[in-house]
Image (cartoon, rainbow, N blue to C red):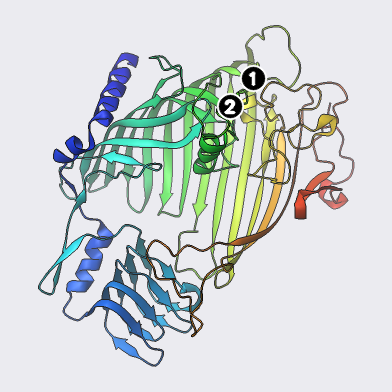
Amino acid sequence: MRQVLRILAIGAMAAVALPAGLVAQGAGLRTTTPIARRAAAVWNSSGTTRVDGAFEVAQSLTVEGSVAVLNGPVIVAGTIRGSLVAINADVRFEPGSRVEQDVVVLGGSITGTDAASLGGEIVQQAELLRYHLDGDILQLDREPEYDDSWWRRHRIRREWTRGEAYSDFVYLASRSYNRVEGWSFVAGPRIQRPTPWGSVNVELFAIGRTAPPRQWDNASVGHDARAELQFGKPIGVALGARAFDMVRPTESWQLGESEAGLSAAFLHRDFRDYYTRHGGEVYARFVAGKDADLTVSLSDEQWRNQAARDPWSLANGADPWRPNPSMDVGNVHLLTTRLRVDTRTREASAFGGWYLNAELEQGGGRIARFGAPVATFAVPSPEQVWYSRAFVDLRRYNRIAPGMSLDLRVAAGGWLAGDGLPTQRRLGLGGPGTLPGFAFRDPGGNNDYLLCTAGFVQAGTPAQCDRVALAQAQLRSGFLFGGWRDDGRDADWWIPGFNSRTAWVLFADAGRGWRVNGGFPNDPLARRNPGPLVVQGRRGRGHRLRWPRALLGEGHEQQR
């Protein structure tokens, strides 16, 4: 199996190494998107008002039926008694404007939705639409088969169209960059086929890692294969199986992939720690449209250590990387339940949305505690462990005025029952992802309430808290810089590619971590309930507050 995956990876790299012109000659074309076909249908309808160029609906004006605009911009202050389609055009809604049906925008931005009355859904596609006019009929041109964006995704694709079914060869650039893998990529075939009862999805990917030394072993080559059957759409159940050999971060909830990768590649600062997961899993996912799903998975996997290597970085490239801490190694079985709810993409909502990511993990197996939070001078022996861990990340996004939002976040979790958590499942705070006023991976002595490393600090300073609690609030506004016209409207809001705005953010956050099972006698951080709370405010200064007695209850005791 390993030899097959290596051959697949070699083929993937050979395909990537082909000259761009050679790839394009044999490429073929990608089918048009559903949004593009929807926009063309509205334009070609006999009852649609068609405009090529700038278009404005005055406040006192009502347009009967749908409106389709090419190249724009579009300003709506009055009423449209139908749908609005903007192709390669930006759309701005004035206060009191109204569109009774859908708003479809391709290749442009949308502003002012909070002040408008929109009766249908908002559908948006960032990419410009390729088209040509055959008289008054809008004909869609197919896109090239590959997307040459650098950081996000590269895809080489040949299609055999049969309804919505397709098969393709995929090349995905790394979603992150780190000191263990360097730049990594995923390559391999992917198949999707709809059926009367749902869909069939198959992915067979090889993973290549570029950090030196590059050689054909587990440090440089991995794999990720998945097969899934989904019954019902958009509400249904998906059953799947997966085999993997991947390098994974220990705390992915703090920073996103792009933020962590850019920091490592350009600033020589890696804000994560890593370990290798090798094994397989089976899962069932209950899907409720695009906004929510519940996944239950059972996996059998092997955890391995992964040392830091020496990938390239733009700044401070001659400096050594922070060591990747030692993790606990061994064979484990995991029963994991995940709940995801995300309503932030509902653009028609005038009040923002919710984000919830909740996870309950029960794990057991034989592991050697190389990452134990106490000094160990002998090679640890594998021991039988069982533990239970939960984590909840809840966020609320509130639009309180046009261009201004108040966003709230509460994250908490950690050990629930059983033996002490493996190092891979321990938690910590501090740095740009949680408490920006406190240095990342700074242990802070014996009264460390961010990483719980009091007593003995390992190389790389891994997080050692059994539990953490974090609260964040931010007030964000997009009105900071920008030219304004005499009539009060922004002068350059509609210019394609230059309509971004600098925002200011006023934030406050508070949090702390603690240990439930102390690593040494008289551990001041080992208690079932937290003591002082680390609070961050203006200028990142730390303060200490006491938890309310009503929250802790009477008689809580410190567990050694």
Quadrant of the frame with the C terminus? top right
The residue furthest left is 135
- Sequence-first tag of 1 and 2: 2
> Does residue 526 show up?
no
Q: Quadrant of residue 443?
A: top right
Check disc 2 and report its element: helix, strand or loop.
strand
Residue drawn at 85 percent across, 52 percent down: 550
Q: Residues within 10 Å of mark 2 (few under 14, many from 20)?
A: many
Q: In the drawing, does residue 296 fall left or right of residue 109?
A: right
149 or 172, which is in the foreground? 149
Q: Is residue 5 left or right of residue 329?
A: left
Percent position of residue 416, x then y:
69, 34
Task: Locate the N terminus by quadrant.
Answer: top left
State the residue lying farthest toward the top. Answer: 378
Query: Are circles 1 and 2 on residues that touch, CB within 8 Å?
Result: yes
Horizontally, is 39 left or right of 263 in the view?
Answer: left
At 46% from the left edge and 23% from the top edge, which residue is drawn?
211
Residue 386's image quarter?
A: top right
Task: List x then y, in percent, for residue 36.
Answer: 25, 61
Which residue is disc 1 drawn over?
Answer: 385
**Residue nearer the viewer, 342 or 84:** 84
Depth order, front residue of 118/300 = 118
Q: Which residue is mark 2?
A: 363
221 to 51, vertically: above or below: above
Q: Which mark is residue 180?
A: none
Res 320 seen here: yes
Label 1: element kind: strand
x, y (%) of residue 470? 70, 47
The amino acid on which the numbered mark 2 sits, given as a three-letter code, is Gly
What is the CA distance from the residue labelled 1 to the residue labelled 2? 8 Å
How packed is label 1: few (under 14 Cα within 10 Å), some, or many (20 or more)?
Answer: some
The residue nearer to you, when weighing 223 against 383, is 223
